[in-house]
């Protein structure tokens, strides 16, 4: 797996904190820093997600992918799945994630709650590389709600 991240503020301006990521699979993703009122030249323009927001989104995508795949492989009629993540960061540098809560909203036809619980656990304990890596610095907790479709 590879990715190239390039600063977009270079082209003679030397300002802004925007970055363009080009993935090995041929996709692009913009990232930007937060605006800095004290030193505008060091801040972003709020034009794209922050790099750590993309890290958190990646973990959510990774684990939601697992949950859907595990439920589908179990022949459950899953219709939707979303994962809302809330994270806390350390107060001092490096401001790593220290706690992450993942709340899954799943809907399906006749999906037993135990199957959703099992799919989430399997993702968190075995399959979701992103969650397992983030779990080295952050306490990760999960919850879910299941609605009949």
Image (spheres, rainbow, N blue to C red):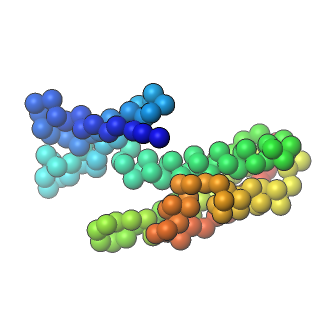
- Residue 47 seen in this snapshot: no
Locate residue 43, reporting x and y percent.
Answer: 21, 48
| Apparent side of residue 133 relative to residue 71 in the rendered image (left or right) | left
Compare residues 1 and 132 and report the one nearer the observer: 1
Front residue of 106/11: it is 11
Residue at 43 percent of width and 34 percent of height: 23
Whether residue 12 is situated above or below residue 121 in the rendered picture: above
The answer to which of 149 and 74 lies nearer the viewer is 74
Residue visible at 70% across and 50% down?
67
Q: Is residue 99 above or below residue 46?
A: below
Residue at 27%, 37% in the rendered image = 6
Residue 107, percent from left and from top: 77, 46
Give the residue drawn at x 39%, y 65%.
96
28 lies left or right of 105: left
Q: Is residue 9 visible?
A: yes
- The quarter of the image holding the C terminus is top right
């Amino acid at each position: 797996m590879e990715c190239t991240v390039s600063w977009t503020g270079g082209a003679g301006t030397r300002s802004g904190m925007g970055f363009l990521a080009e993935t090995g699979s041929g996709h692009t993703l913009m990232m930007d820093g937060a605006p800095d009122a004290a030193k505008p030249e060091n801040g972003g323009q709020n034009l794209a997600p922050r790099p750590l927001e993309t890290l958190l989104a990646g973990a959510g995508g990774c684990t939601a992918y697992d949950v859907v795949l595990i439920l589908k492989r179990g022949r459950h009629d899953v219709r939707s799945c979303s994962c809302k993540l809330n994270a806390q960061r350390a107060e001092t540098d490096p401001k790593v994630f220290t706690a992450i809560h993942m709340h899954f909203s799943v809907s399906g036809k006749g999906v037993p709650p135990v199957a959703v619980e099992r799919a989430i656990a399997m993702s968190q304990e075995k399959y979701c590389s992103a969650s397992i890596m983030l779990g080295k610095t952050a306490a990760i907790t999960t919850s879910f709600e299941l609605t009949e479709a």
